[in-house]
Image: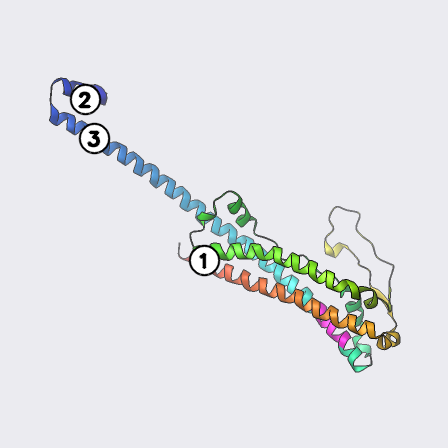
Amino acid sequence: MLLRRVIEHVKAQNWTAVALDFVIVVVGVFIGIQVSNWNDARALSKRADQSLVELRNDFTAIDAAAVELAGFYEALIHDLEVLVRAIDAGKFESDDANAIKAALAYGDIFADPPPPSGTFRDLERSGNLILIENKELRLRLIEYDQSLDNIVASDASINTMLGPFSVAFKRHVVFDPDYHLPNTSDLAFQDVRLPAVSSVNFEDMLADHEFRVAAQQHLRLQIGRYVNIRVSQSKIKQIQEMIDRELRDQ
């Protein structure tokens, strides 16, 4: 209809009307583009806000996992410290028996690092990381995700360093054979009774220099694992604080 009217105005050489029709077309196109851009911006802003909420939920769970992991290493290091102090003192106190047995049973094990953020990885894979408008927060998220690979590599390196000491560390220990794994697909830790130390030859342990060195190395290297987790906790807390600030400022 507008085109027909323009043609009529041209035939009639009504240039004022032609110019007015042209302005109407331009303004209409401009308004349409602006409305479309506004709708796109609203949708993008909504996705960005939702991503922040999802990241906050992710890092709440990640923080809980890191706290549990740090507690695991704290307990393990405590038990190893009890063992090393007893060796250095040249005697074992009866009150330390359980801690020493736990140190010998679990002194060479380690746990997985804190989990990654699924939301961050989805944003990264889809090319939508720009939805996180705060550049510093983006960098912190990238840094945390990369640090998980560093922890895995560090654990592998520690395992290699512990290898030469593993035989001496278990030399004077007898394990209780009574343990089982659940007959289900759920291998949750609480469903598993792991092998425990049933007896320890303390006299031979005290006289064994190689064992003393092995115990010291296990303590030193498990402290290294614990430091890695504590560094991760610091990164997690920083990310949580930044996300909370972003959500408050919305």
Q: 248 left or right of 169? A: left
Q: Looking at the image, is mark 2 or mark 3 earlier in the sequence? A: 2
Q: Residue at x 50, y 58 (%)?
A: 140
At 72% from the left and 53% from the top, the residue drawn is: 188
Q: Secondary structure at mark 3?
A: helix
Mark nearer the viewer, 3 or 1 = 1
Which residue is identified by label 3? 24
Disc 2: CA contacts within 10 A as few (<14), some (14-19) or many (>=20): some
Q: Quadrant of the N terminus?
A: top left
Tell me where residue 223 appears, x and y as whole percent.
Answer: 67, 69
Q: Where residue 136 is drawn, which disc sits there?
A: 1
Kindly report the distance in space between the C-alpha atoms of the residues bearing marks 2 and 3.
11 Å
Q: Position of residue 164 (x, y in %)?
A: 79, 64
Q: Distance from label 1 to label 2 (Cα)? A: 54 Å
Would you call the spot at circle 1 few (<14 residues within 10 Å), some (14-19), or many (20 or more)? Answer: few
| Distance of label 3 from label 1 (alpha carbons) | 45 Å
Q: Give the amino acid at mark 3.
A: Ile
**Amino acid at pointer 2:** Val
**Disc 2: which residue:** 6
Judged from the image, the secondary structure of the residue bearing numbered disc 1 is: helix
| 144 vs 39, nearest the viewer | 144
Task: Report the span colored magenta.
Answer: 75-84
- Give the residue type at disc 1: Glu
Identity of the residue drawn at 77% across and 55% down: 192
